Amino acid sequence: MHPALAADLARFPALLQSARDFAAGEVSGLAERPVAHRGAAPDPAVLPGSGTGAEGALARFAERWAPGFSGSAGPRYLGFVTGGATPASVAGDWLTAAYDQNVSGDAGSWAAALERETVAWLRELFGLGEAHSGAFVTGATVSNTVGLAIGREWVGERLGVDVSRAGASALGPVDVLSGSPHSSVAKALSVLGIGRDRLRPVPVLPGNREAVDVDALEAALAALDGRPAIVVANAGTVNTVDFDDLRAIAALRERYGFWLHVDAAFGGFAALSPVYDRLVDGLDAADSVCVDLHKWLNVPYDAAVQFTRRRDLQVRVFHNASPYLGLPSGEPDFLHLTPENSRRLRALPAWFSLVAYGRAGHREIVERNAALAAQLGEGVEALAGLRLLAPVRLNVVCFTLADDPTREGVSALAEAAAATGETFLTPTVYGGVPALRAAFSNWRTSEADVARVLAALDA
Ligand SMILES: *Cc1c(COP(=O)(O)O)cnc(C)c1O
């Protein structure tokens, strides 16, 4: 064994203690460190010839890289939709690395069974019934991709084509209809060989809404003359957190043949609160559902879950077995369900957080974040230089400059706010107007943080 490796083996517990001490310092300082780091990263160093050992690596990281990491896990990072990591989930993530299980299947470990238990808990948390099965994947983009891959296979089933063998081209053009899809849906269609251009926008409701107009969707489906299609319904749009009427969309399946995929990346968390759960009414009727976990569940990157009612078609797409062995039956190993073959035990951080805080603890995060978003919305309205672009429906505040909101002006405001070190917001364009979004999804955010964000915007 290389001497540095041998020395680390002997000192493994001490090394973990050092890493713990360093991490503890970073986590304690998180709320006060600059929310976004804006300086240039160090120049690349040469590949180390003889290693320093792990303590040396920790020292080098602390000196050279740690100062430039963002405070994105902290309470005032409101860009994109960026959750933090609950204490229990961090502990679970550390143990995931320490155990280093390969959750491709059940062989020799209970880890896959733990993932199944966690998926079942999440299914219940989001109000889905037992007809839905699921698996962990890396994020909502992959979760959407898996759901749409199963939908593609379903279109093939309708047309008498086995897409997994014949390829996407055997289907001919497939129409994918959606009101306000996330950009990851177009990416998924590119990956799946359906094509970005097949994503056909359906008009949304009038009156400052991003939810699909169900009558317009029905007209688009009727115009397909019986050709099977895919509908992507959106439960929580990124700009204004609008929700499609899932129940009304699902009811259209009585007259039209389509696969219903719901992108509930963060909007799915509305199901945790009786105040908001009507927003995802009908979610259980979906054929496939995407929910991100590194956002509003507040587990470390990267984690999401995908659900579907058609695991048989999922296995057809993703099975990784010699054809002569036949398709896996019974409870398939995870390697037959997801794009990955070897898989990290992503379920463990979520399992820890659900055990530690339960349904009630995670509901409290959702409701507090929504209340804080409403509070920031009121604060923005009260500032002379700013105005809301949409009502605050759940956890995102979409606003812009009161007069002449140009792209440059909005970027300058975002820059100025980030330069205070107090907060980080991301720009967007909503209804043709350049704007900023403040998205609340961190477990630590408090009223005092909202006051600091408002002060940064008013500076
Ligand atoms: C964030 C998000 C995605 C993509 O999620 P990743 O985890 O970044 O892949 C997809 N859809 C919606 C609605 C989102 O908010």
Image (cartoon, helix red, strand yellow):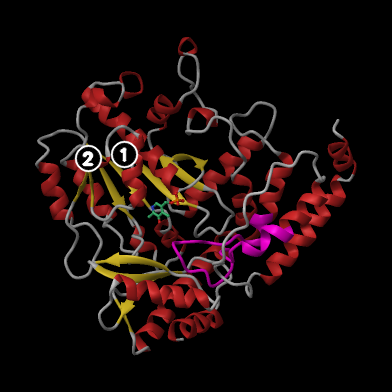
Q: Nearer the viewer, residue 176 or 186?
A: 186
Whichever of callouts 1 and 2 sits on the residue coming sooner in the sequence is 1
Q: Residue at x 42, y 53 (%)?
A: 265
Q: Amino acid at mark 1?
A: Leu
Helix, strand or loop for disc 1? helix
The residue tagged 2 is 198
Dominant SS in magenta:
loop
Residue 189 visible, this orientation: yes
Q: Amino acid at mark 2?
A: Arg
Residue 1 versus residue 20 in the image, above or below:
above
Circles 1, 2 touching at the beta carbon (< 8 Å): yes
Q: Is residue 109 left or right of residue 272?
A: right
Q: Residue at x 74, y 64 (%)?
A: 24
Is residue 70 located in the magenta-colored stretch of the structure? yes
Magenta region: 62-90
Q: Residue at x 40, y 78 (%)?
A: 374
The residue tagged 1 is 189
Q: Residue at x 84, y 38 (%)?
A: 5
